[in-house]
Image: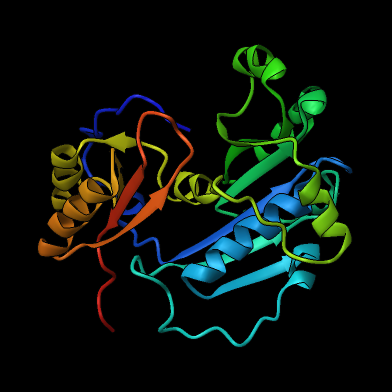
Amino acid sequence: MSSEPKSPSTETPTEDLQRHVDRQRIGFVGPEGAGKTTVATMVSNRLSERTDVAIVGEAATFFEQPSASPENVGPLGVHWTVVDHSPGTDSLETAGDALDTVFVVVTPAMLDRVAAYERVIDQVDSDVFLVVNRFEERYRDRLRDFDGPELAEYFYEDTTLAAAISDETVPKLGEWTTEAILLESLQPERLDTAEAMATLDRGHQSIVNVEVESDASALAVARSFREKGYAADFFRCNCRCHDGHVLARARPPRT
């Protein structure tokens, strides 16, 4: 979700910050009945329209998965894996640090169950975000006051989504996008274009995130990064104040 741009780190670059984000493994966890597989399926479907993606768990049954091509990694050059974990925390406890980012999927009525997942995730080296499914406007204040992981996205109550899962078809959201989940997993920190360019140039981060107001500004921002030799791609979001984000990253060295 949208937030105010943050200043880039002034710390000395470290090996961790300079590493190339060429593989991203994201996991979806949550209680039974939260719609976890629905969300994982929608995210997997959008990713598969962009690039090759490996899907693990129940969400994989909705897709034919040909052998992934190392060449089909999209403009950012990222190999994606989506893991749809079984309900509960047991499978997460055995995942170790295999996940880069974990999304806890709950309904508004299940917010008090998020803490159990946080306790497990705190023991592994993974980022964690909240995804609220079956959201209704009457829950907005409760969600705003919730003390837990940062909100990555919410999905409104939509009976067609559950019906699609029951029919074993990929659910469609129309104008609402799932791409905010992807950009949060890659780089949640927002910078303006100049700060982002300087951050990459100095090696403080290997990937940066710039909010853009329109498709036209997205093209211009992405072009500015590509002209400097960086990989760049545009991700839409559901925020009211802007259309999306350009993510740019240092290209991995050729081997």
Could you tell me how many numbered marks the image carries? 0
Q: In the displayed structure, does residue 63 sit left or right of residue 188? A: right
What residue is shown at x 72% (from left), y 63% (from top)? 170
Task: Name the foreground residue: 135 vs 112.
Answer: 135
Q: In the displayed structure, does residue 83 sit left or right of residue 246? A: right
Compared with 45, 70 (above or below) is below
Task: Name the foreground residue: 134 vs 68.
Answer: 134
Compared with 38, 238 (above or below) is above
Task: Name the foreground residue: 175 vs 155.
Answer: 175
Q: Tell me residue 84's x, y (percent).
A: 74, 58
Residue 58 figure quarter: bottom right
Q: Tell me residue 17's x, y (percent).
A: 32, 49
Task: Give the quarter of the figure containing the C terminus.
Answer: bottom left
Q: Tell me residue 78's x, y (percent).
A: 42, 67
What residue is shown at x 72% (from left), y 56% (from top)? 95
Q: Tell me residue 8's x, y (percent).
A: 24, 34
What residue is shown at x 80% (from left), y 58% (from top)? 164
Q: In the displayed structure, does residue 227 sit left or right of residue 58? A: left
Residue 240 figure quarter: top left
Q: Is residue 120 visible?
A: no
Look at the image and name its color scheme: rainbow
Q: In the displayed structure, does residue 220 sit left or right of residue 138? A: left
What residue is shown at x 75% (from left), y 27% (from top)? 115
Compared with 196, 234 (above or below) is below
Q: Is residue 16 visible?
A: yes
